[in-house]
Structure formats: structure tokens, C-alpha cells
Image: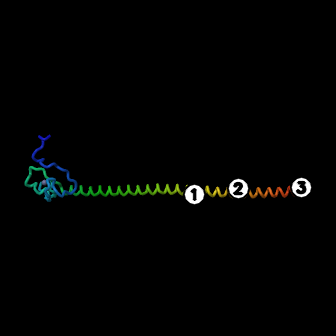
Amino acid sequence: MTSSSTSSARFPRISTHGVPTRCWCGEGITTFGSSTAENRYRQFYRCEIARDRKTENHLFKWIDEALIEEIRMVDVKHERVAQEITMFEERVMEKVKSEMVRVEHEMSEKRKEKVDLEFARVSQEMKHKLKIATVAMVVVGAIVGIWTSLSA
Ligand SMILES: [Zn+2]
């Protein structure tokens, strides 16, 4: 592999995404206008020292392409932020839902407890009333018994 590398590969071609600020060699960059027929007036970024070191591999990038990449990067960032917000909302909603379920459960447990207590109270009252009725019936029965024995 080393035999295939030439002097132009002195610096590894690090892929720069978006608008570059510096060449991978560490040098600053400037903008130039293309003078070739196919890209006439098209602007590009170029390493400041690349002009003097044509055999070396320095940063070259079309400005329009860099800007499109930059816009896409911002788009991706926006997308990610939007996704994060959605995820956060979902997480919050999940928490709220589970909390609501928990509270509901607790509430229904308490309600059930209350109903049970009320039921116990009512049945106790019923029993009490029944007891009174029974006593009353016994009393009535006794009176009737006495009355019948007296009238016989
Ligand atoms: Zn450079």
C-alpha cells in the first residue's frame, strides 16, 4: 500500500464537512474564483499555501457545495433536536401516564377501602337494627304470651 502513495498524499485527506475553517495541514483558507471553462466564476475554498505547493494535497472545496452541506448539517441538527424534544415529551407523557395510573390505583384502593368500611358500617348497623327488631319481637312475643296466658 505504501508504494502506491505519492508525494501528493503528504497530508491525509480528512473529509471536511460543511464550511471549512482550516486546511487539514493547519493552514488557513481563502476563497478563489475558478477560471476553468467548466466552472467559470465558481467560488471555492483553498488552502492558503496550496498555490505554492501544488504537489501536496491541501483542502479544496466548492463554496456552493460546502454551503449546501452546512445547510444539511443544520437541518440534521434541527431534526435531532426535534427528535429529542419528541422523545422528551414521550418520556414525560409516559411518566405522567404511569403516575396517573398509580394515583388512580391508589385512589381506587382508597375508594375500595372506603366502600368496604361503609359496607361494614352499614352491615353493622343492619345487624344492630336486626338485634333491636329481634329484641322487639321477643318483647312483643313475651307480651303476647303473657297476654294469651292471662286471657286464657
Ligand atoms: Zn493546507
Q: Position of residue 38 (x, y in %)?
A: 14, 53
Amino acid beneath label 3:
Ser
Q: CA distance from mark 3 to mark 2?
A: 32 Å
Q: Is residue 100 left or right of residue 127?
A: left
Q: Can residue 102 be seen in the rendering of this structure?
A: yes
Of mark 3 and mark 1, the one earlier in the sequence is 1
Of mark 3 and mark 2, the one earlier in the sequence is 2
Mark identifier at residue 23: none
Q: Which residue is mark 3?
A: 149
Question: Does ligand 1 reach within 8 Å of label 3's beta carbon?
Answer: no
Q: Residues within 10 Å of mark 1 (few under 14, many from 20)?
A: few
Q: Position of residue 37 (x, y in %)?
A: 12, 54
Q: Quadrant of the N terminus?
A: top left
Name the residue: 26% across, 56% down: 73
Q: CA distance from mark 3 to mark 1?
A: 55 Å
14 vs 128, nearest the viewer = 128
